[in-house]
Amino acid sequence: MLAGGAASRFPAKLAIVLPRAVAGLGAVLPEVVVVAKADTVVPETGVAVWREPAAPRHPLLGIAWALGRAGGRAVLVVAGDMPELDPAVLRALAADRGSASAVVPRHPGGAEPLCALYRPAAAPVLRRGAEEGRAARAVIAGLAPDWLELAGAASFRNVNRPEDLA
């Protein structure tokens, strides 16, 4: 679970949304970890918190950091501000048995790189993309991922402002 953003538009976001997102992911996976910057106030969720380097401030760094800490395992990454993810999508990502360096959901609105499965081979590309400040979708496309094709994007809604909770 990525929770390293600055939340400048909605400072209380993590306290409100992260516990719900962790619970949803925990219903599908046997282990959930929150990846956050050292200065991020992470609410108590009952799961471990891995502190990533302070810079660069980019979600791809959090993914690369998690891959480095995961002991050679693939990681299913979910942004901490996505509290309504479809459990069937999460299970499909977690069950993937392919060999591509990433499995990324894609729907008519585009790819969802912050809700995807990443394998250790992706880490150097992700780290480089973060250091260069590149857009996550562009970096992910360069990985030539396996795409999990979906009909809609409703479950990928993220919360960035208080009104997004309605």
Image (cartoon, grey):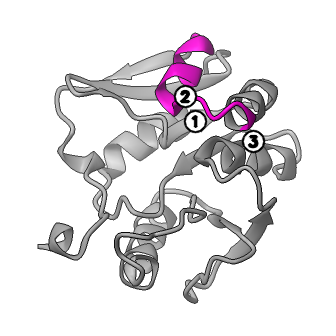
The vertical placement of 125 against 43, above or below, is above
Residue 125 picture location, percent across and down: 74, 24
Contact between marks 1 and 2 (CB within 8 A): the answer is yes
Residue that lies at the very extreme toward the bottom in this rendered image:
44
User: Where is residue 12, by image quadrant?
Assistant: bottom left
Front-lying residue, 134 or 31: 134
Tell me which numbered mark, 1 or 2, is placed earlier along the sequence: 2
User: Where is residue 75, by image quadrant?
Assistant: top right
Residue 42 picture location, percent across and down: 59, 81
List the residue tagged with mark 1. 117
Relative horizontal placement of residue 105, taking residue 76 as reference (left or right): left
In space, the residues marked 2 and 3 are separated at their CA atoms by: 19 Å
The vertical placement of 13 against 103, above or below, is below
| Comparing labels 1 and 3, the label whose residue is closer to the camera | 3
| Comparing labels 1 and 2, the label whose residue is closer to the camera | 1
Amino acid at circle 1: Leu
Is residue 20 on the magenta stretch?
Answer: no
Count all numbered tags in the image, as a single digit.
3
Packing grade of label 3 (10 A; few <14, some 14-19, many >=20) is many
Packing grade of label 1 (10 A; few <14, some 14-19, many >=20) is many
Q: Secondary structure at mark 3?
A: helix
Contact between marks 1 and 3 (CB within 8 A): the answer is no
Tell me which numbered mark, 1 or 3, is placed earlier along the sequence: 3
Residue 102 picture location, percent across and down: 60, 25
List the residue tagged with mark 3. 64
Which residue corresponds to the image point at 86% horizontal and 39% vertical from the top-left? 72
The vertical placement of 97 against 163, above or below, is above
Packing grade of label 2 (10 A; few <14, some 14-19, many >=20) is some
Relative horizontal placement of residue 147, taking residue 83 as reference (left or right): right
Look at the image and give the residue range highlighted in magenta.
131-144
